[in-house]
């Protein structure tokens, strides 16, 4: 009898908790599925922010680890570009730079010691407090990580951009809840905290 994707993913997470890392080929053999099926399962878990997909396998996602280089995103490992940078300050004075609002919101959702956060206006490059930012989620423009989330200082700029590229406008709290729900898809939004 074939396993459901959720059952396989649960077994993958159990193995990761025991071993710390897993290899794609070993998972395919252990679970009796193709490596392509394992890649799809790992992609789903990585998109949810639960694991880090690495060459040949995966590791558990560890929030707020310092990247190897300050120019790399601590969430996905991509180079942080000024146009989409998301800057977080912690209670103990550390600063983290995420590559995009999607990764920045994931860091916020996985940490309890964020003191403040700043986003970069996508059009003008100005730095704005995330509580004053208008978020555009799921536009047709792919900029960095998926789903694409862009930030705008002025709501009217976000509305004009939405007309051309689609997507959904959100304030900070709505965007934060969206990311939290994507990280914990089986929970109702009010249970995620």
Image (cartoon, rainbow, N blue to C red):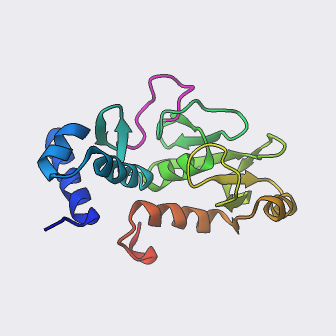
Please report the bounds of the magenta region as a residue range.
62-73
Taking the magenta stretch, the answer to whether it contains residue 180 is no
Evaluate whether residue 22 shows in this view. no
Count of picture labels: 0
Where the C terminus falls, by quadrant? bottom left
Magenta stretch, main secondary structure class:
loop
Evaluate whether residue 151 shows in this view. yes
Nearer to me, 117 or 53: 53
- Name the residue at 83% across, 65% down: 163
> On the image, which quarter does residue 25 sit in?
top left
Residue 140 point in image, percent of width and height: 70, 57
Where the N terminus falls, by quadrant? bottom left
- Name the residue at 70% across, 60% down: 136
Taking the magenta stretch, the answer to whether it contains residue 69 is yes
- Name the residue at 44% across, 52% down: 47
Q: Is residue 156 above or below residue 52?
A: below
Q: Is residue 34 left or right of residue 62?
A: left
Q: In this view, does 15 lie above or below 8?
A: above
Residue 50 point in image, percent of width and height: 35, 51
Nearer to me, 105 or 92: 105
Q: In this view, does 97 lie above or below 141?
A: above
Q: Is residue 19 left or right of residue 79?
A: left
């Amino acid at each position: 009898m074939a396993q459901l994707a959720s059952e396989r993913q649960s077994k993958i997470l159990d193995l990761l908790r025991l071993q710390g890392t897993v290899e794609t080929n070993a998972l395919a053999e252990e679970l009796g599925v193709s490596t392509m099926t394992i890649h799809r399962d790992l992609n789903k878990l990585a998109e949810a922010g639960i694991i880090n997909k690495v060459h040949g396998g995966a590791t558990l996602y560890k929030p707020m680890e310092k990247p190897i280089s300050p120019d790399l995103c601590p969430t996905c490992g991509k180079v942080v570009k000024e146009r989409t940078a998301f800057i977080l300050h912690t209670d103990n004075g550390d600063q983290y730079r995420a590559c995009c609002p999607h990764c920045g919101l994931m860091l916020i959702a996985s940490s309890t010691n964020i003191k403040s956060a700043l986003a970069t206006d996508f059009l003008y490059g100005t730095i704005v407090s995330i509580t004053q930012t208008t978020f555009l989620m799921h536009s047709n423009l792919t900029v960095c990580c998926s789903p694409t989330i862009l930030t705008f200082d002025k709501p009217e700029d976000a509305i004009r951009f939405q007309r051309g590229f689609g997507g959904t406008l959100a304030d900070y709290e709505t965007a934060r809840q969206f990311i939290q729900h994507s990280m914990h898809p089986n929970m109702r939004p009010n249970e995620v905290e």
